Image (tube, grey):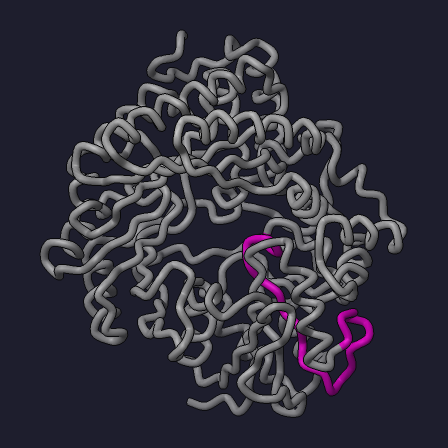
Amino acid sequence: MARGFTVLLLYPGPKSVAYSSLAFHLIRGLLSSMGVGVKTAFLEDGVLEAGQPLDPRETRAVLVSLPYEIMYADMVRALEQLGLNPWAKGRGEGDPLVIAGGPAATANPAPLLDLVDAVLVGELEPVAEGLVDALQEPTRGGRLEALSRLPGVLVPSLDNWPVTRVYAEDLDSAWYPLDQRAPPGVEPVWGRGFILETSRGCGRGCRFCMEGTVFRPRRDRSLEVLKHLLDEGVRVTGAGRVIFYSLVFFDNRASDEILRYAVEDLGLQASVPSLRAETLTEERARLIARGGQRTVTIAPETGSCTIARAILKPIGGDITLWAVDNALGQGITGVKLYLITGFPGEGEEDLAQTQDLALRVVERVRRAGGVAKASINPFMPKPVTGMQWAGLAPRRLLEERINRLSRALRRAGARVSGYDPRWAEVQVALARGGREMARVVVEWARMPRQTPSSFRVAARRAGVSLDWSLGEWPSDYTPPWHRLVEHPRAELWRLRRDWEIYRRVVESRGGASRLRIPGCTA
């Protein structure tokens, strides 16, 4: 049934990235299935690209998908190019509502409070019907009132916080986007294929991981439903490849069978996401290789037994090397490592252990005639994690450590990439910032180029010091997002306890932890 109005789905980034996003397909498809007209717009090299001009008379809302904090400025640039005031208070009765969502907005809505009319805190499926009904209200004020009554929807102008994050409790019964076809001429960044989400959330509890907390609890799709979705998705899209999507792919008990079904029964090419090393058995590596994937990504983060215990990621060197051997032995020719440096309390010994582990992996891969890659990144404290009170390590220290690891691995023959510590400062400032950060975002968006140096200039012009959002906080400090959002299974007391445990473990060099890690002394 047609609802008689249109929304604009704004992805403030390139089309090629949007069409690789399951969230983009889900929002567009779910609302379309409910009779809502959905237009799309993207930001290509800073220039808005929309299929049709925005007609405020028929467009009830601009829905903005924000997976990353860096995209806040892109959102502002897109809104201004649409002819909309970037400040919520500057928009009136004839303007569409601006509604933001996504992991970054869910974790910390504070920087967006003065820019958007509403924030969806959590997942769309539980509130989609209520959202559409609210947008049918005849007046702008009526729409905001109706939105404020929905669970998980924060309306800043009505001060309706705190709201509780909402999530789809049963993925088997949740709506799923089968038509994921990209327009002609658009090549998704991960290539063409049908994206199949096997699970959502993660139950592992790594203390630094925001995605693991804002999508709690972990929920799995059953094998029966996964097979049905894959069959129908391939039929609708004509795809010859399935792209599995999950934070912890092999934690779903159906993952082995759905991978086998895809590559052996359907004859599809298959791609799996980054894997936990302890889950990469020989049989799983065989199936991955049979699906045509030639590189696996493993994220030990660190080679330090102390840091591994502190961040609650008990992988260790022995398990990582075991996984690498399993991969190489089954025809996989490339291994990529994700490494992090700059953890609070990380010392020279910890860095040396990380370098040693990475070099041992590179040696094994090179000896087998394969390609070794490493992505070396700064630790970035994020909201709604046990390490949200930690500060970002000084830029020069991060640059020195990343460069040291990079030089050693390149000399050993690895291909090395990583995240620039200057951009890490921008990301952390936005991620941990309060309401004042909106002024910085608007200043930054209006500059000719968005760079780390121009971000600092924007902060000075806005009269906002970045020292607080980048520095370490007292453990009794309550960050702004905890006043705005209640996160199930990631409550303030639980996260504060995690931070205290982290510090005790690091100070005791692992002695305060009973976590057993193969290859590490007890």
Q: Could you say where residue 302 lies in the image, as x and y percent from the top left?
A: 47, 25
Q: Residue furthest left?
A: 265
Q: Quadrant of the C terminus?
A: top left
Q: Horizontally, is 430 left or right of 100 in the view?
A: right
In the foreground, 109 or 331: 331
241 relative to 139, above or below: above
Residue lying at 59% horizontally and 80% vertically, measured from the top left? 135
Q: Quadrant of residue 465?
A: top right
Residue 13 on the magenta segment: no
Residue lying at 37% horizontally and 38% vertically, measured from the top left? 336
Residue 438 showing in the rendered view: yes
Q: Quadrant of residue 250?
A: top left
Residue 483 showing in the rendered view: no
Residue lying at 36% horizontally and 21% vertically, measured from the top left? 360
Q: Horizontally, is 131 left or right of 319 in the view?
A: right
Q: Horizontally, is 265 left or right of 472 in the view?
A: left
Residue stretch rendered in magenta on the structure: 85-106
In the foreground, 228 or 12: 12
Q: Could you say where residue 377 lies in the image, as x and y percent from the top left?
A: 55, 36
Q: Quadrant of the N terminus?
A: bottom left
Residue lying at 64% horizontally and 32% vertically, measured from the top left? 399
Q: Could you say where residue 6 lies in the image, as x and y percent from the top left?
A: 55, 86
Q: Horizontally, is 339 left or right of 8 in the view?
A: left
Residue 99 on the magenta segment: yes
